Amino acid sequence: MLGGGEAHGLDTFLKKLYAVTVQAPWLIPYEKNDWMLPAAQLFLLIPFFYMSWKVEFFIWKKVETKESLSWINDLVFKANISTYGGLAFIVISFAFMINND
């Protein structure tokens, strides 16, 4: 098991990286580490982006039969890049606001 519910500490860079990537869905509330929440959110945007892109393309493929599938795939990819890029911008902005307090 990946040890999601267990705290492994933040002693080394690899442990910090493990905490905000592998444990991102069930982030352990380490004290005085405000950077971890935005880092975990940014990491989780990656699989959410990929799944959103593939699911939306799958639906378009079922609905639209006249258009080229590569054109639709590119359109869905670009739409998700803009959406998830905006979400990443918001997360990074809040991270800077938290660290400047």
Image (spheres, rainbow, N blue to C red):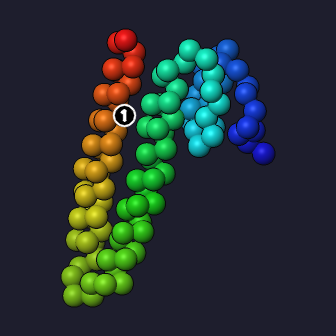
Q: Position of residue 21 (x, y in %)?
A: 57, 37
Residue 88 or residue 14, whichever sits in front: 88
Q: Position of residue 37 (x, y in %)?
A: 50, 30
**Residue at the spot of label 1:** 91
Q: Position of residue 92 (x, y in %)?
A: 34, 29
Q: Residue at x 25, y 72 (%)?
A: 72
Q: On the image, which quarter does residue 51 sit in? A: bottom left
Q: On the image, which quarter does residue 19 sit in? A: top right
Q: As displayed, is residue 20 above or below residue 83?
A: above
Residue 58 or residue 89, whichever sits in front: 89
Q: Let me know if residue 14 appears in the view.
A: no
Q: Residue furthest front?
A: 101
Mark 1, secondary structure of its residue: helix
Q: Residue furthest right?
A: 1
Q: Residue at x 40, y 75 (%)?
A: 58
Report how many numbered discs are placed on residues in the image: 1
Q: Residue furthest bottom?
A: 66
18 on left or right of 95: right
Q: Position of residue 4 (x, y in %)?
A: 71, 39
Q: Residue at x 61, y 17 (%)?
A: 31
Residue 35 or residue 79, whichever sits in front: 35
27 on left or right of 81: right
Which amino acid, mark 1?
Val
Q: Let me know if residue 7 appears in the view.
A: yes
The C terminus lies in quadrant: top left
Q: As displayed, is residue 32 above or below residue 60?
A: above
The N terminus lies in quadrant: top right
18 on left or right of 44: right
Mark 1 Cα shell of 10 Å, populated few (<14), some (14-19), many (≥20): some
